[in-house]
Image (cartoon, helix red, strand yellow):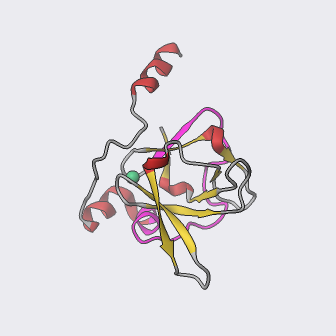
Amino acid sequence: MCILFALLALVPFEWNGEKVSRSEESWLELLGSDRYAVMRERRTERAFSGKYRPLEGVIYSCAACGLALFDSKDQYNAGNGYPSFKRAIVKKNIYFAEDRSLSFKRYEVLCRCCDSHLGHVFKDGPPPKGLRFSINSITLNIR
Ligand SMILES: [Zn+2]
């Protein structure tokens, strides 16, 4: 167990400034059609279809590039069928983009390293910042 924690401590969690880019064909091959639809075509998975109920002691990383994104200590159950987080593990590992695909304005959450779509952020979350990162579980791997 101690060795595992020592190894985890050595893995950098912060984005190193390098971008991962691939052709769309290569992303499709890497991700498979379900993940590709969410991460590259900005679709949303069906609610409650994911495998990530709030867990303990895990780090979630981007399923496309491996960058650490969320810590389970910031995860909570928002009751809507999507993994919800109070914040990103490291602020600069994600970024936001305006999404006007519905009748109201939303902000999508993207991976800073590979520009994959992860989900959306809303302002109805718990303290301290009141943010709810509503993330498609298919975009996450447990690190
Ligand atoms: Zn990524």
Residue 37 in the figure: left or right of residue 137: left
Asked if residue 96 lies in the magenta stretch, the reply is no
Query: Residue 28 location in percent, x, y?
Result: 33, 64
Which residue is depicted at the point 59% across and 48% down?
A: 87
**Outermost residue toward the bottom in this view:** 103
Residue 31 position in % (x across, y down): 37, 58
The image shows residue 128, relative to residue 104, as above or below, that is above
Q: Which residues are magenta?
A: 34-61
Q: Nearer the viewer, residue 39 or 25?
A: 39
142 relative to 27 in the view: left or right:
right
Task: Find out whether residue 54 is within the magenta segment.
Answer: yes
Q: Extreme top residue here?
A: 2
Q: Which secondary structure class fits the magenta region best?
A: loop
Question: Residue 12 falls in which quadrant of the image?
Answer: top left
Residue 135 is situated, as x and y percent measured from the top left of the image, at 57, 58
Residue projecting furthest to the front:
129
Q: Vertically, is 35 above or below 55?
A: below
Kindly indicate the quadrant of the structure image that contains residue 9.
Answer: top left
Q: Position of residue 110 (x, y in %)?
A: 45, 60
**Residue 115 relative to residue 86: left or right:** left
Instruction: Report the residue at 70% width, 47% height from top.
Output: 128
Residue at screen point 64% across, 49% down = 86
